[in-house]
Amino acid sequence: MKRGEKMQKILITGSNGQIGSELIEELAKKYGAKNVVGLDIVEPKESKYEFVKLDATDFEGLKKVVEKYDIGQIYHLVSLLSATGEKNPDLAWHVNMSSLKHVLDLAKEKQLMVFWPSSIAAFGPTTPRENTPQRTILEPNTMYGVTKVSGELLCNYYFIKYGVDVRSVRFPGLISWKTPPGGGTTDYAVAIFYEAIEKGYYKCFVREDTVLPMMYMPDAIRAIVELMQAKKEKIKIRTSYNLAAISFKAKDLELELKKYIDFKVDYEPDYRQKIADSWPKTIDDSAARKDWGWAHKYDLAAMTKDMYQNLVKKLKK
Ligand code: SER
């Protein structure tokens, strides 16, 4: 950008969601509050930033927003997650796929940069579960996972065919205290904190020996920012990068949290156990580490401490 030139704005779709509500803060800090625009189907209680209420499957509506605000980058976070998607697979396909297609079409037409998150849900029961490679079998058994694999292929296609600068990571389960998550399988690792603090009891919907890859939100937000800032030639994978931080058993998290608070847990697996069992335990993210320098900071102990302390403060207010 030349000096004196006006910066193109950044659009965050799904800006009220688990990732969006934290990413918008970080991007506003970095690029200025005037340069970020949030978009969501639900109006937030309050918004410090420009906000548009829109269903992201509305192509014409989205196009108007991009033109009105002179958008240069879209962080497209709109999505139904795994457990919600299993309750309404048709809606998950519609929302997840058509909104991504619209974003990519607009990116092609207006030379926009795009970030779009994929997930460990792109993997399935036939994928090697330990140290899951970057390039491996992708046969998910959830509709959410199907939309992630399809979305990855679509992103790669738009890059090859039209040169769209779209970048993506396969997020593990994300743990955060600012915004409650909605409808994910890995969300037991968030719910356990709320219930321990508020009720002293948690009924966990996966078995105690369930191991899943997870990441603390500050690491996830930094991953997005670093990936989007990396020089174009460093981005060698245009489907989606494997990304890892911590892997632990549900029981490990219970024991770690018990260092701070006394509470009881019963393990009563439901339909989400099958989803968890179809996902990897550990991920090989060496390509992300090599190509654009990814490194996580939070381990289980650091995450649990920070999460617990912040949530206690938040829930007391
Ligand atoms: N956290 C997501 C889920 O459990 C995985 O991407 O659905």
Image (spheres, helix red, strand yellow):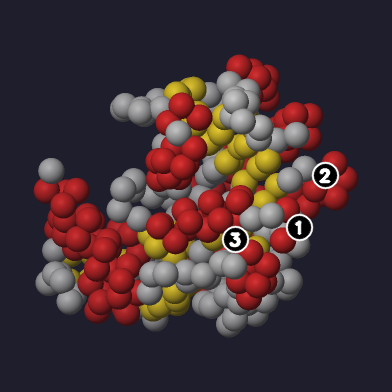
The N terminus: image quadrant:
top right
Within-10-Å neighbours for mark 3: few <14, some 14–19, many 20+ = many
Position of residue 314 in the picture relative to residue 6 (left or right): left
Residue type indicated by callout 1? Glu
Within-10-Å neighbours for mark 2: few <14, some 14–19, many 20+ = few
The C terminus: image quadrant:
top left
The percent position of residue 256, horizontal first and vertical second, equals 25, 77
Within-10-Å neighbours for mark 1: few <14, some 14–19, many 20+ = few
Position of residue 298 in the picture relative to residue 288 (left or right): left
Residue type indicated by callout 3? Arg
Q: Is residue 63 visible?
A: yes
From this viewpoint, which residue is outermost toward the front? Answer: 3
User: In front of the other: label 3 or label 1?
Assistant: 1
Give the number of the disc on residue 233: 1
Residue type indicated by callout 2? Gly
Give the number of the disc on residue 255: none
Q: Residue at x 36, y 27 (%)?
A: 47
Quarter location, residue 76: top right
Quarter location, residue 215: bottom left
In the image, residue 11 sits, relative to residue 93, either above or below, namely above
The percent position of residue 29, horizontal first and vertical second, equals 41, 41
In the image, residue 172 sits, relative to residue 161, either above or below, namely below
The percent position of residue 62, horizontal first and vertical second, equals 63, 24
